[in-house]
């Protein structure tokens, strides 16, 4: 790491708020001066009357190593020879009001003592040799927006522990955690805050040492090894970062030189009573240099791929978490923190100028617009935002008993009203599995089987929903108890209980499916990548939609949030052809009931849900399935007779024409020109047209010039056609008959209902059988009683498919 020479220019930039490498100037730096090796100590303390460096090397005597001010009058400096790496030290600051010295850790210190000790440690950061150049090149060539981002959120202190209950080290994590994440097909690891912090119960969100990676798990170089190992495995590293507030501990930043320094002079703004912390003063330029340099530091010195910025709403709003009277509006009378807004603009512009491929992810819980849009477009400058609205809605929804879900269907679908207003990450984070909120699987209603089935269905829906993904550790195998920061995850569940093992394997398979199918991530932030099939089926708690890739390929996702199997369910599809079920959360290998669609699903030319073609599938209980078009139809339309062909082909003058499948619920219009009749009756045509009456009786309209032979042949041909058996695999309720002079009949599209023995709708739409009078009239007229009997038998009504109405001319 380079070390600044403390030039006037560096000092000027620091005070201006634009020195984005302030860590090269301030802190403890190992160097050589006047032929002697030692450490240069530099600290910003403008209000101090006197500052000295104390430690084991001088028996903590404040009189021995006193610092002197630089030309700016605010920064103190001292070179101490014969001091090197591993030296423990603090700054002893004498306030203007005198009194006892204040003992402070170094704000720019690179390493710190293990808790409960609080001193800083001199550390040389320039020795590690990185081996992740391929990863850096990959990021340059593959922007994050158009590649998969499936993040595994981890708290290093509780992911896994030794048999004795001790922490795993960074080196242990480099092997165990990285290998696990790779095997589970995650693309990124998000680490909860690793800045040095005194209290385990803060989870790292209340820091004292912003430049010191916590010593709980090892040294800075050992943490670098963890990051390096992840990058070599093709896994990105994101770190939680907290520029919003800091803890009040005496060794930290609060009242650093005896007065407010890093916090605001306005006590009302400085105090964060809700969290027992202190807010940064974003209007002070030196604080801007401190924080922006810190963001750069993690990317520069630790090759961190991105930062997830915690509690952005606390920064943006003056009244965040405050009662009326506890805050003062800005100069325009609003509640926005103008200084914080300017700081965030400055932060993001600086980061992306230096690290164009960085991930800057805002945890922002309000509707503040354009959080993830560039500053030049009027945005806040982040490139991603956590979708907290989706998270809250969907977790409320899945916590409901299925019987009540239909009354809260909007919780499932409302997110698409704003899904493309930001670059969203869909988080299932640590905050949702603590403090009595229950673990994800414990949120699921129902018995033991239904809880796992519900979690699988939810994960399948989540994975197909637009947006990048994040899951907190333990959710992937269905841990029942809430997360405990002071204990390991319950890995014994996977080893001892089949359902947890199956849940883990489901997560592994689902993750791989996501990573392998670009329709789920290539167009995440635009309507071009998403289309509803049916978002209104509240009664059945069922949604279906399409995810699309840039090349036009697509996947259909169908989620059923009830424990009922939906047999013969019709869905509109964007293209005609043969579909296959390529993923099913109800598969037996995942612990499901194995209700599968393990056959070719052939589309029909039946308009449904605004689509020209549709398919029939069985939707498993509490499950999500994915369908893919395997082979498009050559002519763009698949006739309904292609599922299981039993209808005989008629030989006509048009070689391509095939006889349309007859149904009992529609009128039929067909022109039949048998070759035999054509040969005996020159230039004579036979017209047949179905009547528009509900009895659908056939009426002959042959001309007077027809010969007796022609009439007999035509009648016989029709009788044979009428009596052909209909055994197509898929049930049919409507058909478009496009013939010369025949009117096109379109079925009315209705949403599917619950399968029952015979619903009211089925009874209503059940076709009426032909009467004996109607079916025999033609036979008598032709002199063919046998044909009449066959026709009468063939027209006995069959059970119609649920949820579709009979179309009548």
Image: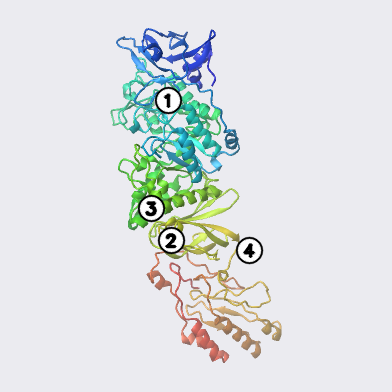
Crowd tier of the residue under label 3, counting other residues whose Cα lies within 10 Å: few below 14, some 14–19, many 20 or above: few
Crowd tier of the residue under label 4, counting other residues whose Cα lies within 10 Å: few below 14, some 14–19, many 20 or above: few
Horizontal arrangement in the rendering, residue 521 relative to residue 766 (left or right) = right
In the rendered structure, are the residues bearing label 3 and label 4 in contact, judged by CB atoms less than 8 Å apart?
no
Q: Position of residue 622 (x, y in %)?
A: 40, 57
Please, is residue 599 above or below residue 63 in the view?
Answer: below
Residue 210 numbered mark, or none:
1
Please, is residue 773 above or below residue 445 in the view?
Answer: below
Crowd tier of the residue under label 2, counting other residues whose Cα lies within 10 Å: few below 14, some 14–19, many 20 or above: many
Crowd tier of the residue under label 1, counting other residues whose Cα lies within 10 Å: few below 14, some 14–19, many 20 or above: many
Measured Cα–Cα span from mark 3 to mark 4? 52 Å
Measured Cα–Cα span from mark 1 to mark 3? 42 Å
Residue 497 numbered mark, or none:
3
Q: Nearer the viewer, mark 4 or mark 2?
A: 2
Upstream in the sequence, badge 3 or badge 2?
A: 3
Measured Cα–Cα span from mark 3 to mark 2? 24 Å
In the rendered structure, are the residues bearing label 1 and label 3 in contact, judged by CB atoms less than 8 Å apart?
no
Q: Position of residue 110 (x, y in %)?
A: 45, 22
Residue designated by label 4: 635
Q: Residue at x 47, y 41 (%)?
A: 151
Residue 242 numbered mark, or none:
none
In the rendered structure, are the residues bearing label 3 and label 2 in contact, judged by CB atoms less than 8 Å apart?
no
Q: Secondary structure at mark 3?
A: loop
Q: Nearer the viewer, mark 3 or mark 2?
A: 3
Upstream in the sequence, badge 3 or badge 4?
A: 3
Horizontal arrangement in the rendering, residue 521 relative to residue 567 (left or right) = right
Q: Residue at x 55, y 49 (%)?
A: 516
Q: Residue at x 49, y 13 (%)?
A: 38
Q: Residue at x 60, y 60 (%)?
A: 631
Q: Secondary structure at mark 4?
A: loop
């Amino acid at each position: 790491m380079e070390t600044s020479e403390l030039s006037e220019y560096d000092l000027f930039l620091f005070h201006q708020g634009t020195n984005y490498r302030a860590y090269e100037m301030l802190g403890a730096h190992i160097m050589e001066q006047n032929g002697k090796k030692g450490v240069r100590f530099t600290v910003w303390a403008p209000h101090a009357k006197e500052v000295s460096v104390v430690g084991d090397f001088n028996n903590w005597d404040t009189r021995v190593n006193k610092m002197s001010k630089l030309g700016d009058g605010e920064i103190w400096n001292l070179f101490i020879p014969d001091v090197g790496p591993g030296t423990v030290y603090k700054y002893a600051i004498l306030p203007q009001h005198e009194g006892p010295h204040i003992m402070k850790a170094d704000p720019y210190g690179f390493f710190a003592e293990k808790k409960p000790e609080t001193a800083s440690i001199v550390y040389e950061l320039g020795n590690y040799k990185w081996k992740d150049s391929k990863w850096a090149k990959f990021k340059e060539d593959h922007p994050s927006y158009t590649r998969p981002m499936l993040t595994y959120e981890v708290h290093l202190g509780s992911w896994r522990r030794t048999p004795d209950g001790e922490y795993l080290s960074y080196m242990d994590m480099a092997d165990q955690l990285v290998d696990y994440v790779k095997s589970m097909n995650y693309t990124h690891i998000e680490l909860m805050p690793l800045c040095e912090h005194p209290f385990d119960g803060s989870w790292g969100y209340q820091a004292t040492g912003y430049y010191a990676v916590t010593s709980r798990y090892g040294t800075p170089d050992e943490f670098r090894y963890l990051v390096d190992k992840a990058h070599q495995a093709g896994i990105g590293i994101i770190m939680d970062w907290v520029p919003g507030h800091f803890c009040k501990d005496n060794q930290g930043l609060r009242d650093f030189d005896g007065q407010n320094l890093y916090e605001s002079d306005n006590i009302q703004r400085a105090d964060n009573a809700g969290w027992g912390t202190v807010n940064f003063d974003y209007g002070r330029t030196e604080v801007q240099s401190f924080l922006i340099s810190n963001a750069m530091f993690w990317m520069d010195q630790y090759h961190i791929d991105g930062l997830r910025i915690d509690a952005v709403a606390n920064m943006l709003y003056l009244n965040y978490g405050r009662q009326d009277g506890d805050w003062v509006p800005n100069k325009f009378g609003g509640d926005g923190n103008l200084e914080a807004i300017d700081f965030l603009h400055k932060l993001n512009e600086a980061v992306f100028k230096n690290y164009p491929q960085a991930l800057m992810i805002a945890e922002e819980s309000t509707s503040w617009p354009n959080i993830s849009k560039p500053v030049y477009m009027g945005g806040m400058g982040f490139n991603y935002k956590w979708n907290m609205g989706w998270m809250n809605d969907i977790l409320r929804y899945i916590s409901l008993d299925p019987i009540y879900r239909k009354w809260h269907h909007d919780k499932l679908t409302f997110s698409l009203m704003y899904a493309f207003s930001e670059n969203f990450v869909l988080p299932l984070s640590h905050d949702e599995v603590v403090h009595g909120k229950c673990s994800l699987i414990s949120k699921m209603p129902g018995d033991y089987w239904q809880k796992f089935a519900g979690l699988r269905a939810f994960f399948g829906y989540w994975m197909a929903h637009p947006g990048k993904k994040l899951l907190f550790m333990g959710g992937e195998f269905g841990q029942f108890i809430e997360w405990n920061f002071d204990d390991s995850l319950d890995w014994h569940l996977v080893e001892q209980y089949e359902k947890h093992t199956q849940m883990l394997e489901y997560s592994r398979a689902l993750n791989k499916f996501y990573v392998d199918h670009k329709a789920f991530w290539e167009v995440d932030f635009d309507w071009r990548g998403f289309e509803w099939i049916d978002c209104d089926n509240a009664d059945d708690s069922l949604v279906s939609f399409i995810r699309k890739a840039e090349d036009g390929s697509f996947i259909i996702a169908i989620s059923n949030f009830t424990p009922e199997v939906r047999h013969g369910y019709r869905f509109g599809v964007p293209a005609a052809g043969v579909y296959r079920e390529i993923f099913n959360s109800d598969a037996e290998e995942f612990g499901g009931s194995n209700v599968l669609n393990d056959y070719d699903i052939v589309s029909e030319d039946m308009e449904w849900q605004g689509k020209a073609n549709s398919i029939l599938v069985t939707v498993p209980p509490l499950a999500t399935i994915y369908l893919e078009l395997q082979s498009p139809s050559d002519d763009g339309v698949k006739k309904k007779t292609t599922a299981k062909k039993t209808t005989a082909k008629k030989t006509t003058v048009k070689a391509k024409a095939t006889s349309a499948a007859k149904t009992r619920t529609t009128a039929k219009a067909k022109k039949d020109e048998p070759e035999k009749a054509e040969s005996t009756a020159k230039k004579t045509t036979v017209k047949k047209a179905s009547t528009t009456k509900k009895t659908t009786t056939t009426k002959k309209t042959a001309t007077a010039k027809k010969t007796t032979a022609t009439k007999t042949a035509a009648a016989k041909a029709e009788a044979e056609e009428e009596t052909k058996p209909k055994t197509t695999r898929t049930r049919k309720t409507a058909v478009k008959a496009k013939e010369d002079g025949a009117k096109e009949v379109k079925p009315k599209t209705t949403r599917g209902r619950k399968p029952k023995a015979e619903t009211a709708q089925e009874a209503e739409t059940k076709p009426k059988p032909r009467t004996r009078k109607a079916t025999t009239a033609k036979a008598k007229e032709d002199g063919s009683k046998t044909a009449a009997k066959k026709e009468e038998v063939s027209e006995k009504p069959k059970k119609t498919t649920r949820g579709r109405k009979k179309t009548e001319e």
